[in-house]
Amino acid sequence: MTGAPVVKGPRGAVIELVLALAAAIGCVLSWLASVTTVEVPPIIEGEPPTTSLVYSPPLLTLSLLLATVAGVLAVLGVARLRRVRRGPVALTG
């Protein structure tokens, strides 16, 4: 049975950390793109119009998903990097 090749060692950890960084950047960009400023007409005549922020739900959802992916990949990458640097653990018993 052949599957996708698995990258092991410090190279795999670096790849996971780079992907975590890319997901975090995508999260920020998605969050910034989700905000739109709109002008709200006055309620009482003679008052000036005000502005309000409108958020796009699909872009906010994408932002939260990318934040989750970034967090998971960062934890996995750091854990793998620590395991590689520590070396193999000898089991006794």
Image: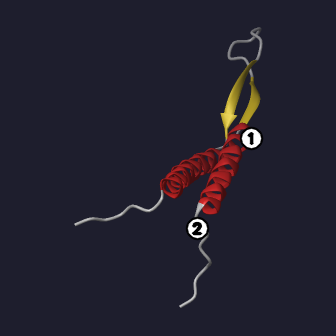
Q: Nearer the viewer, residue 65 or 44?
A: 65
Report whether 47 appears left or right of 71: right
Name the residue carrying label 1.
Answer: 33
- Residue reaching furthest bottom? 1
Q: Position of residue 78 (x, y in %)?
A: 54, 50
Contact (Cβ within 8 Å) of mark 2 with mark 1? no
Crowding near the residue tagged with mark 2, few <14, some 14–19, many ≥20 C-alpha atoms within 10 Å: few
Write down the residue under mark 2.
8
Which quarter of the image is occupied by the C terminus? bottom left
Identity, as a three-letter code, of the amino acid under mark 1: Ala
Secondary structure of the residue carrying tag 2 is loop
Q: Give me the residue at 65% from left, 55% from top.
A: 14
Badge 1 crowding class, 10 Å Cα cut-off, few under 14, some 14 to 19, many 20 or more, is some
Q: Give the mark, 2 or 1, whose residue is nearer the N terminus.
A: 2
For image coordinates 61% across by 50% down, the residue present is: 66
At 66% across and 59% down in the image, what residue appears? 15
Q: Quadrant of residue 41?
A: top right
Q: Secondary structure at mark 1?
A: helix
Residue type beneath disc 2: Lys
Q: Could you say where residue 25 lies in the image, as x and y percent from the top left?
A: 70, 44
Between the C-alphas of marks 2 and 1, the distance is 36 Å
Tell me the tag on residue 88: none
Image coordinates of residue 52 in percent, x first then y, are: 70, 25
Image point (60%, 57%), residue name: 13
Is 26 positioned to the left or the right of 74 in the image?
A: right
